[in-house]
Image (cartoon, rainbow, N blue to C red):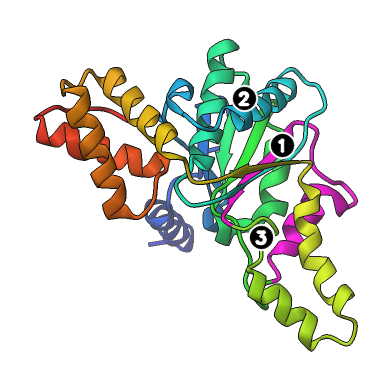
C-alpha cells in the first residue's frame, strides 16, 4: 500500500466517524425555536404548547398592552422589551406564547418566537448575530428569569437590552417572565445594602437591570369570580359535560387543596375533571 493510499483510507475513515454537517440556523423552518447554547443551534418547534388568547381570563389589561406592543413590533414600529412579573401560575408565559400565536394568526409568519433558557443567557452574544441576520422579526423569550448572589450572567443581558455598543438588533425584542419585579430576591438586595461601603451603588447595578425593560406587566392571584370564569371558559372550550353547581363546588374545592387561585390551578383542575369524565383534551 502506497503512502497516498494510506492517507486516503485514513481520510475516508475520519469522514465516516465525523458527525454530519451542523444544519444551518434557518429561521424560516418554523415560527418557534429553542436555543441550544452548547451547540449554537436553534431547534425548530413544530407545535408550541400554548393556551388560546381568548381563554386567558383575569389578565385582560396585561393582554391588551402586550398585544399592542407586539403588534407594533411585528409591523416594524418601535416597541419595548417586556418584563412580565408576579405570582406563580398567573399566566405570564402563557400570555407571551398566546400573543405570538395571535400575531401570526393575523399576519402569517410575522414573528419568530425564540426561547432561551435562563442558564444560557451568557450565550446571547452568539445568538443575537444569528437573529439579526435571519431576516425575521424575533421575540426572544426567557421564562422564569432571575439572578442569585454572585451571578454575573445579568451583565450579558444588561448589555443586550440597552448598554452595549451594538445594543439590541432592530429585529429583536426581549420578553421575560419572573416571579421577582427586580429580578433579584428582596433579601439579596437588603444584604447588598447592609454589607456595602456605599449601599446605594452596591445595589444599583443589579436592580437597574429591570429598568431596561420599557414595559412592566404585573400579575397577581385571581379572585374567586375570575378563577371560576377561567374554569368555565375551559369547560365550554372542551365541551365537558357537568352541572354548573357541581362544577363550581369541585373547582372551589380544588383551589382550596392547592392553596391558591390562578390560571395554572384552573387548568390542572380541568385536566383532573376531563380525566374523571373520560374525555381527552389538547392543550
Sequence-wise first label, 3 or 1: 1
How much space separates mark 3 and mark 1, taking CA atoms? 18 Å
Q: Residues within 10 Å of mark 3 (few under 14, many from 20)?
A: many
Residue appearing at x 46%, y 20% in the figure = 54
Judging depth in this view, the residue of 273 and 8 nearest the camera is: 273
Q: Is residue 155 magenta?
A: yes
Q: Taking the image as drawn, is residue 249 in sight?
A: yes
Q: Secondary structure at mark 1?
A: strand
Task: State the mark number for residue 183.
Answer: 3
Task: State the mark number for residue 39.
Answer: none
Sequence-wise first label, 1 or 2: 2
Q: Quadrant of residue 119?
A: bottom right
Q: Is residue 177 above or below residue 185?
A: above
Lateral position of residue 102 relative to residue 192, left or right:
left
Provide residue 111's location: percent of width, then percent of height.
62, 25
Provide residue 282's location: percent of width, then percent of height.
27, 28
Q: Is residue 1 above or below residue 196?
A: above
Q: Is residue 16 magenta?
A: no
Q: Are marks 1 and 2 in contact (CB under 8 Å)?
A: no
Provide residue 240's location: percent of width, then percent of height.
19, 22
Task: State the mark number for residue 111.
Answer: 2
Q: Quadrant of the C terminus?
A: top left
Q: Is residue 26 above or below residue 103?
A: below
Residue appearing at x 76%, y 46% in the figure = 213
Q: Secondary structure at mark 2?
A: strand
Q: Quadrant of residue 81?
A: top right
- Range shown magenta: 152-179
Task: State the mark number for residue 173.
Answer: 1
Q: Residues within 10 Å of mark 2 (few under 14, many from 20)?
A: many
Amino acid at each position: 500500500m502506497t503512502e497516498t493510499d494510506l492517507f486516503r483510507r485514513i481520510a475516508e475513515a475520519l469522514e465516516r466517524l465525523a458527525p454530519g454537517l451542523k444544519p444551518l440556523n434557518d429561521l424560516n423552518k418554523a415560527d418557534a425555536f429553542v436555543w441550544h447554547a452548547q451547540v449554537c443551534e436553534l431547534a425548530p418547534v413544530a407545535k408550541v404548547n400554548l393556551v388560546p388568547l381568548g381563554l386567558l381570563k383575569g389578565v385582560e389589561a396585561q393582554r391588551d398592552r402586550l398585544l399592542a406592543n407586539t403588534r407594533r413590533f411585528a409591523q416594524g414600529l418601535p416597541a419595548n422589551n417586556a418584563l412580565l412579573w408576579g405570582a406563580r401560575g398567573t399566566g405570564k408565559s402563557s400570555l407571551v406564547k398566546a400573543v405570538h400565536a395571535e400575531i401570526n394568526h393575523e399576519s402569517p409568519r410575522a414573528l419568530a418566537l425564540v426561547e432561551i433558557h435562563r442558564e444560557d443567557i451568557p450565550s446571547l452574544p452568539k445568538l443575537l448575530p444569528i437573529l439579526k441576520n435571519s431576516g425575521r422579526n424575533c421575540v426572544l423569550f426567557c421564562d422564569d428569569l432571575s439572578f442569585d448572589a454572585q451571578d454575573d450572567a445579568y451583565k450579558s443581558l444588561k448589555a443586550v437590552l440597552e448598554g452595549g455598543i451594538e445594543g439590541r438588533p432592530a429585529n429583536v425584542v426581549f420578553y421575560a417572565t419572573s416571579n421577582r419585579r427586580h429580578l433579584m430576591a428582596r433579601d439579596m438586595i437588603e444584604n447588598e445594602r447592609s454589607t456595602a461601603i456605599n449601599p446605594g451603588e452596591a445595589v444599583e447595578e443589579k436592580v437597574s437591570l429591570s429598568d431596561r425593560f420599557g414595559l412592566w406587566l404585573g400579575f397577581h392571584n385571581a379572585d374567586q369570580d375570575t378563577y371560576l370564569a377561567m374554569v368555565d371558559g375551559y369547560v365550554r372550550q372542551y365541551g365537558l359535560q357537568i352541572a354548573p353547581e357541581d362544577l363550581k363546588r369541585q373547582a372551589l374545592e380544588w383551589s382550596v387543596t392547592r392553596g391558591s387561585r390562578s390560571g395554572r390551578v384552573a387548568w390542572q383542575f380541568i385536566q383532573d375533571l376531563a380525566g374523571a369524565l373520560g374525555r381527552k383534551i389538547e392543550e
